[in-house]
Image (cartoon, grey):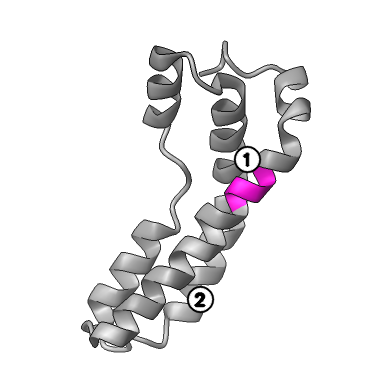
Amino acid sequence: MGLGLSVGGLRSNLKASFALATVKLVVMPLIVYGLCVVTGLNPLYTVAAVICAAVPTAKTVYVLAHEHKVEEKLVAATVSVTTMLSVATLLVALYLLSGLAPGVR
């Protein structure tokens, strides 16, 4: 992935990468949380599901993009951006979900 990501590639795809990162790190966990609440899922499982939805984009997505020669630079930039931003968004998600399963410490 390092070879596929250059500073120019990151700059040229910055807007799209941040839009995709917002969907991946904010919208997806909110959708998963809503589905967990609607279905009445156990609070501990809800926390696990939301955190799984809130992790950064997997690096294997870049491997697939490279293999199929589709949007390699955008995918590389998105993986990098979501990895950087997930440090903050995962902490926020964990903090907000910490009251759901109080017996688990």
Q: Position of residue 74 (x, y in %)?
A: 61, 28
- Residue 40 percent coordinates (x, y): 24, 88
Find residue 29 and report its horizontal and vertical position in percent: 45, 66
Above/below status of 10 relative to 55: above
Is 19 magenta? The answer is: yes
Instruction: Identify the residue at image location x=71%, y=31%.
Output: 13
| Image quarter hosting the C terminus | bottom left
Q: Label 2 vs label 1: CA separation?
A: 22 Å
Of the image marks 2 and 1, the number of the one nearer the N terminus: 1
Q: Quadrant of residue 48?
A: bottom left
Return the x and y of residue 62 as percentages of the image width and height.
45, 25
Which residue corresponds to mark 1? 81
Mark 2 residue element? helix
What amino acid is found at the position of numbered circle 2 in the picture? Tyr
Instruction: Tell whether 58 sits left or right of 44.
Output: right
Q: Circle 2 sits on which residue? A: 95
